Image: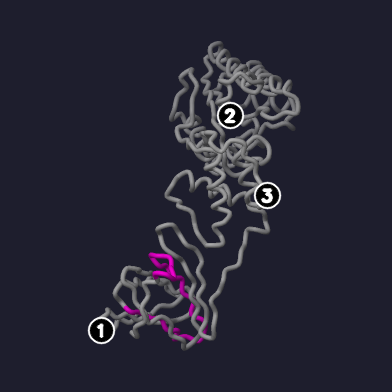
Amino acid sequence: MSILVTGSKGFIGRNLVATLHNEGYESVYECDADTTPEQLSAFCQAATFVFHLAGVNRPPDAGDFMPGNAGFTATLLSNLNQHGNSCPILFASSAQAALDNPYGQSKKAAEDLLFAHSRETSAPVFVYRLPNVFGKWCRPNYNSVVATFLHNIARAVPITINDPSANLTLAYVDDVVDELLRALRGVISPTGQFASVPVTHSTTVGALADLIQSFHHARASLAIPALDDAFTKKLYATYLSYLPAEALAYELHMNADARGSFTEFARTMGQGQFSVNIAKPGITKGNHWHHTKHEKFLVVSGKGVIRLRAVGSDSVVAISADGERLKVVEIPPGYTHNIENIGDTDLVTLMWASEAFEPQRPDTFFLQV
């Protein structure tokens, strides 16, 4: 296929083009503000599918909406008609096309041009009235409240909220791109009506800001958000993409002594705690048990032996582990356990506990194996 993408350097266009290349599409023609009329004409002659994503949404003058949206759409269709090309066209319109404002009016005019083109040429036309779209590479402080909040909060810059109860309908850019690819592959067919992305998320401006603020403060507690919630998962991934370079790494508190160190790495909501344990040669750590908490030990470097004994039993289970052949050792509740470094180098063990440690309720009791 030969695919033309207008607005290829914009937010949705950039994500779409990257995905098309990742999916193995080789003939992708990228049209943006720096594309010449001659290039556009050549693209329109060769294209077998058009993603029309170009448009104006925040010009310095409201009078630029109509030429930037309806005007360019007319130019695109004129080029296709000149080459007798009636290939499918997918247009990224806006939910605001139903509203009486200059931007909405210009998008509605572009929609009308596309539907008329379809009637006259039988070209399949998909018109998506998109809600607010968020995701990586969206420009902050422009026309996306999500991008602005993410960018500013990631930098501890104040945000402005006029109405925290205002409702938002949001679509994640990867969900949008998935839907566009479904149209490209013929999974869905145009109906002559407005199309919509099937996966959206509803929230309020205040709830959105609170959730992003929780991401920003999570590092202090090493908390990872509840990623089983689809919206939280998508928003947190997007938040990380807005971190400034100097915030991409952060130090952890190492509880260190002559025996080695123990460093908590991450805490999850309901899925436990991750830590890194380092033991010096000849050192044994542990000798405790838990009522409910259970753990998984994974030695990633060095040589060690993990010993377990069921409370009340005299039978000891000894399991050798090293960084050469990775294996997980389960630590069930009711078993006192320890880990000994029997090598000549540091013993490094990744540890997962089913519950994050709470000093007020540690569920940890000393008992020699």
Q: What mark, if any, has residue 157 been given in the picture? A: 3
Residue drawn at (54%, 34%), measured in percent from left and top?
166
In the displayed structure, 175 sits above or below 47; it is below
Q: Earlier in the sequence, mark 3 or mark 2?
A: 2
Does residue 266 appear to the left or right of 362 in the view shown? right
Q: Mark 3 or mark 1, which is nearer the start of the sequence?
A: 3
Can residue 91 be spotted in the picture? no
Query: Is disc 2 surrounded by few (<14), some (14 to 19) or many (20+) residues within 10 Å?
Result: many
Residue at left offset 43%, top offset 85%? 284
Q: Position of residue 346 (x, y in %)?
A: 51, 81
Between tags 1 and 3, which lies in front?
Answer: 3
Which mark, by number, is residue 51? 2
Q: Residue 43 in the image: state x and y as whole percent.
A: 65, 27
Which mark identifies residue 135?
none
* Residue 24 or residue 295, whichever sits in front: 295
**Residue 25 x %, y %:** 55, 38
Is 123 above or below relative to 243? above
Judging by the rendered image, the residue that carries numbered circle 1 is 315
- The part of the chain drawn in magenta is 336-361
Question: What's under tag 1, amino acid-wise?
Answer: Ser
Residue at the extreme top of the image, as rendered: 120
User: Which residue appears farthest toward the bottom when viewing the image?
Assistant: 282
Circle 3: residue type: Val
137 vs 344, nearest the viewer: 137
Asked which secondary structure carries label 1, the reply is loop
Label 3, label 2: how many angstroms apart (C-alpha)? 36 Å
Residue kind at label 2, given as amino acid type: Phe
Secondary structure under tag 2 reads: strand
Quadrant (top left, top right, bottom left, bottom right) of the N terminus: top right
